[in-house]
Image (cartoon, rainbow, N blue to C red):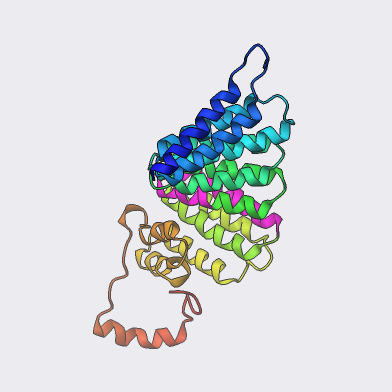
Amino acid sequence: MAAKINEAHDHIAKAEKYLKTSFMKWKPDYDSAASEYSKAAVAFKNAKMLEEAKEAYLQEAEAHTNNKTLFHAAKRSFCYRALEAAGMMLKDMQRIPEAIQYIERASMMYVENGTPDTAALALDRAGKLIESQDLAKAVDLYQKAASVFENEDRLRQAVEMLGKASRLLVRQHKLDEAAVSIQKEKNMYKEIENYPTCFKKTIAQVLVHLHRNDFVAADKCVRESYSLPGFSGSEDCIALEQLLQGYDEQDEDQVHCVCNSPLFKYMDNDYAKLSISLRVPGGGKKKAPASAADAGEGAEAGEADEDEYAGGLC
């Protein structure tokens, strides 16, 4: 351990020497200094001195930034690696918000450097890191990653990032924003012709809108989905029609039956929670249990009349 610490300090001393100027040396040698700072950071990291490793990586990034002899693209790439490495040191120290700042700065450099895919992946990683501490920041990072992918016409990757953002918005009960985000997801899935997933997004939309007490918006989502190939008559379509009918008629039993069906219960967890917690307006009404006499009288009528929900979920 002591040997690694001494090695690190030796590299720091060499880096500082490369940065000094003199009568015979007019310009600092930023390239060599950056290399020494990088070696020092690795040595500090191996010695479990994470704060010192972080500082060494930041000094490496600064040296690369000041190195005017490097091509612009190369300079950005070196800075990115050093900044992200500093962020990882902060992550290991459980200083997640600080870590995110450096990773986010690095990702923006990658965008400027012409490597947006790497930038989006860095933003995705940052979102995963911060989720447990700051859901709003995680949403922001996932949305930025989605925008980067979308600008590159990488819609499959973009919609994956949007999906993460939508679920976290629901978790925070930011349902207005979630409704907008899910609609954008649905539009992208339609563009890449992934229609079955569009159906699932319609279910998510309806649940969000009903929790917003906006039956009209929920109904509109279903009506618009009839234009999607295969939606009409699908399991998703039938379930949504039954859900909207039960909700509109304040039929608590029917709504409970649909929302507790496997189609709804096995959605992503955040949407499944919306499903099982959905209640009809005004507390709803339950169908009164039939008496023995009523049951006998109704038997013949039941044979004559077609069951309203025959073949449905409830």
Q: Reply above or below: 295 against 252.
A: below
Q: Position of residue 215 (x, y in %)?
A: 47, 51
Residue 155 in view: yes
Q: Reply above or below: 7 against 273.
A: above
Residue 140 in view: no
Q: Residue at x 44, y 58 (%)?
A: 271
The quarter of the picture where the C terminus appears is bottom left
Q: Which residues are magenta?
A: 164-192
Q: Position of residue 147 (x, y in %)?
A: 63, 42
Q: Residue at x 53, y 49 (%)?
A: 217
Residue 64 within the segment the image draws in magenta: no
Q: Residue at x 27, y 75 (%)?
A: 289
107 sits to left or right of 204 = right
Q: Position of residue 192 (x, y in %)?
A: 70, 57
Front in this rendered view, residue 31 or 134: 31
Q: Chief secondary structure of the magenta span?
A: helix
The quarter of the picture where the N terminus appears is top left
Front in this rendered view, residue 275 or 241: 275
Give the quadrant of residue 180: top right
Q: Reply above or below: 173 against 258.
A: above
